[in-house]
Image: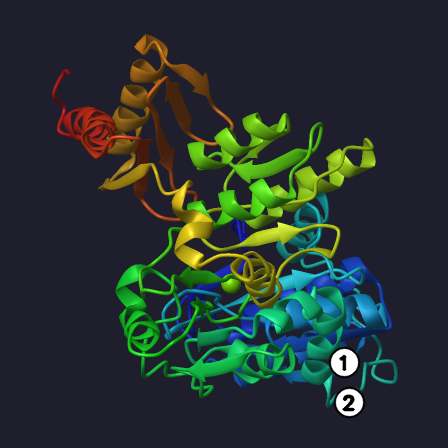
């Protein structure tokens, strides 16, 4: 049984994901941690307090005294965990729509636990071998104020504040009603930026836009930049561990282009950059040019974190890692994704030239996606067989880290069955849009044909 997906536990609140279940996840986590103290934090979702209460009860039941942090971005909860040396249960569904909620667990080093520890938590959950405390040993709780302020203070010491302040930038900020609404405006103001905001009131109904920072949700941010003198627009997801940018003209910047630009500024010879198997050629080109290595993992931040830990233990230098969805790691700062920190790192580049110029040379690929849904096991098997057949016949370079990725000279295509939903995602990328469409359509067509029982 896999409870934790590639980014924690998620579901429609009080339907797929119940408070009873979150309580048991907390009991299992507390049992594995075996600690006397732990913390609970949440994003702005309407059901956040319900699940935070359930998590606190679960932790208390296995004997942990609970620090209640209230609404804090996930990276702020990670900063707290590291500073105080306590693990944290973060109640968030990240970028998912308002009706969702979920749990991310954070170790007492501020880092999400490695895959092996997640499996131990799942095992305790499955066998219900909880280390239940006696009545006199259950954990108490205390309200902690100031976790947000401490996080912002720490961020300010971690970035190149002088360089950014000297450029006197105007930043349009869209925290999307999420937890970043309570930290990012203050952070960028104290950094010396003039800050304009949209969707900046914390609101778990997400009235202005859904939490996912994708182009269709960022029209108002684009217009704010366009109609003001802002140098850049920055958008977060619901728990503000991601940052997506809009250039000075209000044009959406692909997350892959941002990652490539930041990597180009960061990578040196013999460094390693870690990304998922969905990685853009833009990033691979940058690594090539820098004489750096690339390690591709299965999709999901847990896998990326695990790979970075392994590489660092072997003495490798991993200055940057992440995915094209705006979730970027600078491991020398912290092995965590942090939307505000990434925003400041991008501002350091914008201090020298306009945002559009920063990403121009990385904006040369086109990405196309398809999704093929299936109904039952036989359809799934037919589709999987078809992917394998195509992969073995094709003359591209095959990577089976997570799904089947075929790399050709002029582009690549990936067919990846979802771990949690009955569908296969197809990703394609090429310098030429027509070629990207062709790669995606060929793969999607073969899978649709197999599903319909047609020989292709
Ligand atoms: Mg997130």
Q: Does the residue labelled 2 lie within 8 Å of ligand 1?
A: no
Dot 2, crowdedness within 10 Å: few (<14), some or many (≥20)? few
Q: In this view, does 82 lie above or below 294?
A: below
Q: Is residue 446 above or below residue 32?
A: above
Q: Can residue 89 be seen at all in this image of the molecule?
A: no
Q: Which residue is drawn at 43% across and 64% down?
A: 95
Q: Is residue 156 above or below residue 370?
A: below
Horizontal side, residue 56 vs residue 198: left or right: right
Horizontal and vertical percent for residue 451?
A: 18, 30
Horizontal side, residue 222 vs residue 241: left or right: left
Q: Between disc 1 and disc 2, whose residue precedes?
A: 1
Horizontal side, residue 347 vs residue 227: left or right: right
What is the CA distance from the residue labelled 1 to the residue labelled 2?
Answer: 6 Å
Q: Mark 1 near mark 2, Cβ–Cβ under 8 Å?
A: yes
Helix, strand or loop status at disc 2: strand
Quarter holding residue 452: top left
Query: Residue beneath label 2, please?
Result: 142
Quarter holding residue 57: bottom right
Horizontal and vertical percent for residue 222?
A: 31, 69
């Amino acid at each position: 049984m896999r409870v934790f997906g590639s980014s924690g536990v998620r579901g429609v609140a009080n339907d797929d994901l119940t408070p009873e279940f979150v309580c048991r996840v907390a009991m299992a986590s507390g049992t594995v941690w075996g600690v006397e103290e732990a913390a609970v934090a949440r994003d702005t979702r309407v059901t956040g307090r319900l699940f935070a209460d359930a998590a606190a009860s679960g932790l208390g039941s296995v004997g942990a005294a609970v620090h209640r942090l209230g609404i804090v971005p996930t990276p702020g909860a990670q900063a707290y965990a590291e500073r105080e040396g306590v693990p944290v249960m973060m109640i968030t569904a990240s970028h998912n729509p308002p009706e969702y909620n979920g749990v991310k667990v954070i170790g007492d080093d501020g880092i999400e636990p490695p895959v092996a520890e997640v499996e131990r938590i799942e095992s305790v959950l499955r066998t219900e071998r909880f280390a239940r405390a006696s009545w006199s040993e259950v954990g108490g709780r205390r309200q902690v104020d100031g976790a947000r302020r401490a996080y912002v203070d720490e961020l300010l010491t971690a970035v190149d504040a002088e360089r950014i302040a000297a450029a006197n930038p105007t930043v349009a900020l869209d925290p999307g009603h999420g937890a970043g609404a309570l930290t990012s405006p203050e952070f960028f103001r104290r950094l010396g930026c003039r800050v304009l905001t949209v969707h900046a009131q914390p609101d778990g109904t997400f009235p202005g836009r859904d939490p996912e920072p994708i182009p269709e949700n960022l029209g108002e941010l684009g217009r704010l930049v366009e109609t003001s003198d802002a140098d850049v627009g920055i958008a977060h997801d619901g728990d503000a561990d991601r940052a997506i940018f809009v250039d000075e003209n209000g044009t959406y910047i692909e997350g892959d282009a941002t990652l490539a630009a930041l990597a180009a500024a960061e990578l040196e010879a013999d460094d390693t950059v870690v990304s998922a198997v969905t990685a853009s050629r833009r990033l691979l080109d940058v690594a090539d040019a820098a004489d750096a290595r690339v390690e591709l993992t299965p999709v999901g931040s847990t896998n990326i974190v695990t790979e970075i830990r392994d590489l660092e233990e072997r003495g490798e230098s991993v200055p940057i890692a992440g995915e094209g969805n705006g979730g970027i790691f600078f491991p020398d700062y912290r092995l965590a994704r942090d939307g505000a920190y990434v925003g400041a790192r991008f501002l350091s580049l914008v201090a020298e030239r306009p945002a559009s110029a920063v990403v121009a040379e990385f904006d040369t690929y086109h990405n196309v996606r398809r999704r093929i849904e299936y109904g039952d096991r036989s359809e799934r098997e037919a589709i999987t067989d078809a992917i394998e057949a195509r992969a073995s016949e094709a003359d591209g370079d095959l990577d089976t880290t997570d799904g089947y990725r075929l790399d050709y000279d002029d582009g690549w295509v990936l067919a990846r069955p979802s771990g949690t939903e009955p569908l296969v995602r197809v990703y394609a990328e090429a310098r030429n849009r027509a070629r990207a469409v062709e790669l995606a359509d060929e793969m999607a067509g073969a899978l649709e044909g197999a599903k319909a029982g047609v020989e292709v």
